[in-house]
Image (cartoon, rainbow, N blue to C red):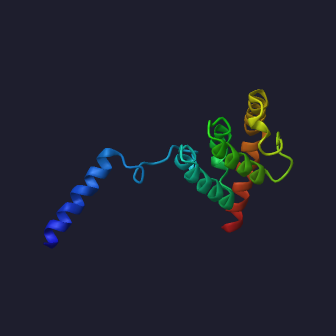
Amino acid sequence: MAIMIRRFSCVLAVAVLVTGCSLFRGRPAGESKYSEALRSEDPLVVMQACKQVEAERDYLAVPDLIDNLESDDFNIRGWSHLALFRFYHDKPPYAPPFGTLDEDSSKRAFAIRRWREWWETEGRQRFEKEAKEQENATK
């Protein structure tokens, strides 16, 4: 019996590896461990990922949060907007009152463009520096 269970476990492990289960796939360099969850179409999954990103200050997730501002789902947009706002701490590049981005698609496009510009010109470098400082402090 034990041999059958062991053999089944090995077969199952190989099947999972061959089919590419996300638990065994490596993330691309520079991608957050929450990227897959943040790209989910399930608002509850995105909400939990946003909370984890905030708690861990996972700056690698910022591009995914910005991408989520384009989501068709109000909840995904809202949680991502809130996470960006909380993540930034200072005055964000563009932070209209919650919900106003849904009133006008041109305002939303403008906000997304501002967030992307900020990330490329300032945000990435700021958070990379912060991450290196934290890493050096823990050594």
Q: Residue at x 54, y 49 (%)?
A: 37
Q: Quadrant of the C terminus?
A: bottom right
Taking 111 as reference, is 134 above or below it? Answer: below
Outermost residue to the bottom: 2
User: Which quadrant holds residue 107?
Assistant: top right
Outermost residue to the top: 106
Outermost residue to the right: 91
**72 or 134: nearer the eye?**
72
Left-right relation of 49 to 21: right
Residue 77 in percent (x, y) is at: 67, 42
Taking 89 as reference, is 30 above or below it? Answer: above
**43 or 55: nearer the eye?**
43
Outermost residue to the front: 103
How many numbered callouts?
Answer: 0
Q: Quadrant of the N terminus?
A: bottom left
Q: Residue at x 26, y 53 (%)?
A: 14
Residue 22 in percent (x, y) is at: 42, 49
User: Which quadrant holds residue 5?
Assistant: bottom left
Q: Residue at x 68, y 57 (%)?
A: 54
Left-right relation of 97 to 139: right
Q: Residue at x 74, y 29 (%)?
A: 105
**136 or 27: nearer the eye?**
27
Residue 90 in percent (x, y) is at: 85, 51
Residue 40 in percent (x, y) is at: 53, 45
User: Which quadrant holds residue 117?
Assistant: top right
